Amino acid sequence: MVDAQTFTAFLYGWTALALVLLPIQLFLTPPYGRHRSTAWGPVMDNRAGWVVMELVSPIAFAWCFVTGGGVGGVAWIFFALWMAHYIHRSLVFPMRMRTSGKTIPVAIVASAIGFNGINGWSNGYYLGGLGGPYPEDWLADPRFIIGMLLFCAGAALNISSDNILLRLREPGGGGYKIPRGGLFALVSCPNHLGEIVEWAGFAIMCWNLPALAFAVWTAANLIPRSISHHRWYRERFADYPRERRAIIPGIL
Ligand SMILES: NC(=O)c1ccc[n+]([C@@H]2O[C@H](COP(=O)([O-])OP(=O)(O)OC[C@H]3O[C@@H](n4cnc5c(N)ncnc54)[C@H](OP(=O)(O)O)[C@@H]3O)[C@@H](O)[C@H]2O)c1
């Protein structure tokens, strides 16, 4: 498919694009969820949009991993983690959203399909063949151990915080309340913080460029989104906790 040199050059460009878009997303918040807008053209059902755009990632990853030449071994652990995250994100999370009647712009779904397709392809392709096998003692390497701990801690924070948010509404409801409990005591978006820690952990345990690129993209998407969410809460709720930060406790 793609030789190693082209693949690496593409990923440098892809990562640079995330860094360019980070400051832009501070002023131009992608219009879904509480920031949704009809100014971005046609819309579709919110739940269906989430399933379609997120399912692209595990399909692209699995296809490229399995057809990539069969490196196997340790890489199957990374395969399992990617699948577990994205089966939850694409099939479980959307079904639990209390989002009846809400829509998402087709433009957002289309751009997320491209985003998830590139990340699923680059990570599956590299782990499935291009990167070659991991050494047999990789499981004892500090990078694997630290990365795995961060991945698990981040996933636990992401899911437990999303659970608090999803339970705030009555079934069929659509409004917003001030979230409380867990790390919401310190930040407005612990679910986003958990997601960033999770993929930083994945990048450390895989120790390769496509995983790093995805970790950078996740931070570039979610740091500005958390700041927008935080600003939105403070504008709408006069009693919003003053000490709460956007995403990094005590700092940001
Ligand atoms: N890897 C990446 O680049 C990336 C990018 C984006 C998102 N994500 C992940 O995808 C998940 C969803 O992201 P998001 O930004 O859409 O999360 P979010 O705004 O925190 O919303 C999560 C869910 O909770 C509901 N909700 C949020 N705040 C609420 C409140 N105060 N009261 C009642 N309901 C509330 C939302 O409803 P509404 O939809 O109606 O607002 C939505 O169903 C997160 O786990 C995030 O980490 C990852």
Image: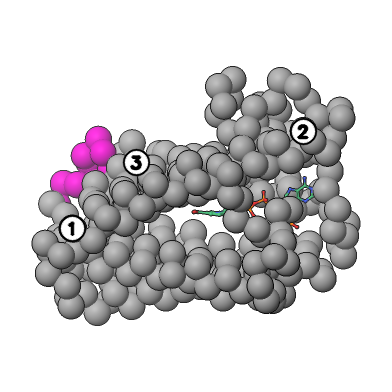
Separation of disc 3 and disc 1 at Cα? 22 Å
- Residue beneath the point at 19% across and 63% down: 7
**Amino acid marked by disc 1:** Thr
- Residue beneath the point at 61% across and 68% down: 50
Q: Earlier in the sequence, mark 3 or mark 2?
A: 3
Asked if disc 3 and disc 2 are in contact, CB closer than 8 Å, the reply is: no
Q: Secondary structure at mark 1?
A: helix
Residue identifier under label 1: 8
- Residue beneath the point at 30% across and 42% down: 204
Residue identifier under label 3: 147
Q: Can residue 86 be seen from the camera position used here?
A: yes
Q: Can you say whether 26 is above or below 106 in the image?
A: above
Q: Which mark is residue 41?
A: none
Position of residue 233 measured from the top left corner of the image (x, y, whole percent): 76, 38
Residue identifier under label 2: 234
**Amino acid marked by disc 3:** Gly
Q: Secondary structure at mark 2?
A: helix
Position of residue 42 measured from the top left corner of the image (x, y, whole percent): 67, 76
